[in-house]
């Protein structure tokens, strides 16, 4: 099966078609979709959505772009919600969390400090509950890695990775996998395509970040999780290997880095294994 390790299935762009989109992905062989939360306001939403389809699971976290309007109380609520969710087999980790120094507002000194404080506390939550993290890393590769080294969770995924080979190795060394998706389908995305070609396949997981980061054949339209197999075909072509190998190895990587998801897949309602 294919696994989409990062998909905002609750996004408004999908409207009333959210569940149909999950079904479309399932028919294309996408056996699991990970839905990360972005703020206090959608913690319930992602959990409820994941409960409605067998090929979905979820993570809880506060996204860096939501940090400007977040409060310390939101972190307390998140910790309590994570503790309560440990009894839900569809809850698989902490995310989407991280640092974003690309957006000018978020790169102002006060907001950088607030982002770092929120990220570090969410790393503590993940560490305290033995969970992996789904990290947002934009113009902040070294900074995210620095804090992960200091407060190390139980693995994680560097979502939409676009750093250097040295930075990639740093994430691999702390037990992370690297997420690749629609960006690698663009011929002009030379650095991402080099990374996707030359990094060990054992370090790579597939993702869409739907509705964002649409592949070349959809751009600038709305991305959907059913695109994972076709993105995987491009990755296979870049690496010169069978697409089945990309499917099976990246799915195994996702299962290894998200052990609660693996348990869900192997449970009584399992939809299959890669």
Image: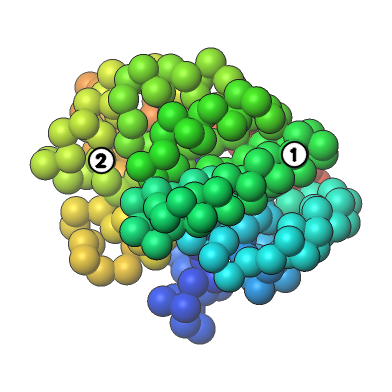
Q: Residues within 10 Å of mark 1 (few under 14, many from 20)?
A: some
- Residue at 31% x, 44% y is 231
For the residue labelled by badge 2, is the local secondary structure a helix, a strand or a loop? helix
So how many labels did they put on this image? 2
In which quarter of the view is residue 256 placed? top right
Q: Identify the residue at image location x=73%, y=61%.
A: 72
Q: Is residue 81 left or right of residue 244?
A: right
Q: Residue at x 40, y 53 (%)?
A: 107
Residue at 41%, 39% in the rendered image: 140
Distance (Cα) linking label 2 and label 1: 32 Å
Query: Where does the C terminus fall, quadrant-wise?
Result: top right
Residue 15: tell me if it is visible: yes
Q: Which residue is mark 2?
A: 184
Q: Position of residue 191 (x, y in %)?
A: 21, 31
Provide the residue designation for mark 1: 124
Q: Is residue 106 left or right of residue 258?
A: left
Front-lying residue, 238 or 199: 199
Residue 125, x across and y down, in percent: 76, 43
Give the number of the disc on residue 238.
none
Looking at the image, can residue 256 be seen? no
- Name the residue nearer the viewer: 221 or 17: 221
Answer left or right for 157 relative to 88: left
Percent across and percent down for residue 243 are 33, 32
Percent position (x, y) of residue 237?
22, 30
């Amino acid at each position: 099966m294919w696994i989409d390790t990062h998909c905002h299935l609750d996004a408004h762009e999908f409207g009333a078609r959210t569940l149909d989109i999950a079904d479309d992905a399932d028919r294309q062989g996408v056996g699991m979709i990970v839905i990360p939360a972005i703020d206090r306001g959608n913690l319930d939403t992602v959990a409820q959505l994941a409960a409605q389809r067998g090929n979905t699971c979820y993570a809880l976290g506060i996204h860096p772009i939501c940090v400007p309007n977040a409060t310390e109380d939101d972190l307390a609520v998140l910790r309590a919600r994570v503790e309560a969710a440990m009894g839900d087999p569809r809850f698989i980790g902490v995310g989407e969390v991280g640092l974003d120094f690309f957006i000018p507002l978020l790169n102002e000194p006060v907001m950088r400090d607030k982002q770092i404080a929120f990220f570090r506390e969410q790393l503590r939550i993940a560490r305290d509950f033995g969970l992996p993290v789904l990290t947002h890393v934009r113009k902040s590769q070294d900074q995210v890695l620095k804090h992960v080294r200091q407060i190390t969770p139980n693995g994680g995924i560097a979502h939409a990775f676009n750093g250097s080979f040295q930075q990639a190795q740093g994430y691999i060394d702390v037990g992370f996998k690297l997420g690749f998706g629609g960006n690698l389908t663009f011929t002009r995305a030379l650095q991402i395509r080099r990374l996707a070609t030359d990094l060990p396949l054992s370090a790579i997981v597939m993702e869409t970040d739907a509705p964002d980061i649409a592949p070349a054949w959809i751009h600038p339209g709305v991305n959907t999780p059913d695109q994972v197999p076709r993105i995987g075909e491009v990755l296979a072509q870049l690496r010169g290997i069978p697409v089945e190998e990309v499917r099976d190895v990246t799915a195994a990587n996702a299962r290894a880095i998200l052990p609660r998801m693996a348990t869900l897949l192997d449970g009584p309602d399992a939809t299959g294994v890669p």
